[in-house]
Image (cartoon, grey):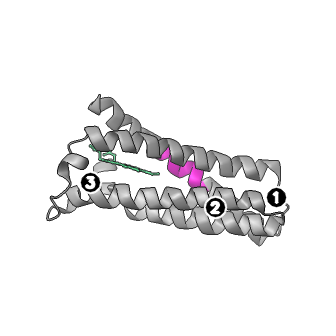
Amino acid sequence: MYGFIQKFHSGWAYLALLLLVVAVVNSLVGLAGKKEFTAKDRKIALFGLIGAHTQLLIGLILYFVSPLGMASLGQMADKTLRLTSLEHPLINIIAITLITIGWSKHKKLTASESKFKTFTIFYGLGLVLILSRIPWSMWL
Ligand code: HEM
């Protein structure tokens, strides 16, 4: 069980990050080019949201089965364990909450510029937070 979930979380991370990067770049291009927000832009943002939510679900399961998750909570002197048991989960939950708020907010907006701006800010901030707390040395 642990091995499978760990590999799934490790592999899905590539897709989740790629979809988020594409969504942020697309909203930046739309904003800078003063483009009209179309169904294609909505789909790109939706895929970013789904990718992140799927990673969140796998991460939550992993947290309870991994020796580096909840089981290591409290070992704050060890940098790696502090990252995997506290910083990475906490910051990622905050990041995905921001991404979800961005998605909800865009639905209430009508102007294309406001929609692109909302995705740029909320998805962009979420992406930066996620990248700041990836256990890079374990992953790559
Ligand atoms: C978009 C959000 C997230 C991304 C991109 C992500 C990505 C990653 C990556 C790349 C690793 C290293 C995998 C490896 O060693 O091969 C990792 C490990 C880990 N993640 Fe996440 N993660 C996310 C969210 C979460 C969340 C929300 C939780 C828990 C609530 C979580 C819990 C963990 C744990 C416990 C580990 C260590 C697993 C182990 O090696 O035993 N992750 N994550």
Q: Is residue 15 visible?
A: no
Disc 3 versus disc 2: distance between alpha carbons?
27 Å
- Image point (50%, 41%), residue name: 54
Q: Residues within 10 Å of mark 1 (few under 14, many from 20)?
A: some
The residue closer to the viewer here, 19 or 105, is 105
The nearer-to-camera label among 2 and 1 is 2
Q: Is residue 97 visible?
A: yes
Q: Which residues are magenta?
A: 13-21
The nearer-to-camera label among 3 and 1 is 3
Give the dominant element type of the magenta stretch: helix, strand or loop. helix
User: Hey, which quadrant is residue 130 in on the image?
Assistant: bottom left
The residue closer to the viewer here, 12 or 117, is 117
Q: Please, what is the three-letter code of the amino acid marked with disc 2?
A: Gly
Report the disc number at residue 46.
none
Report the disc number at residue 85.
3
Q: Is residue 4 magenta?
A: no
Kindly identify which residue carries mark 1.
Answer: 37
Ligand 1: does it lie within 8 Å of the C-beta at label 3?
Answer: yes
Query: Mark 1: which secondary structure?
Result: loop
- The first of marks 3 and 1 along the sequence is 1
Where residue 140 appears, x then y in whole percent? 34, 50
Query: Mark 3: which secondary structure?
Result: helix
- Image point (35%, 34%), residue name: 5
Report the disc number at residue 102.
2
Q: Please, what is the three-letter code of the amino acid marked with disc 3?
A: Ser
- The first of marks 3 and 2 along the sequence is 3
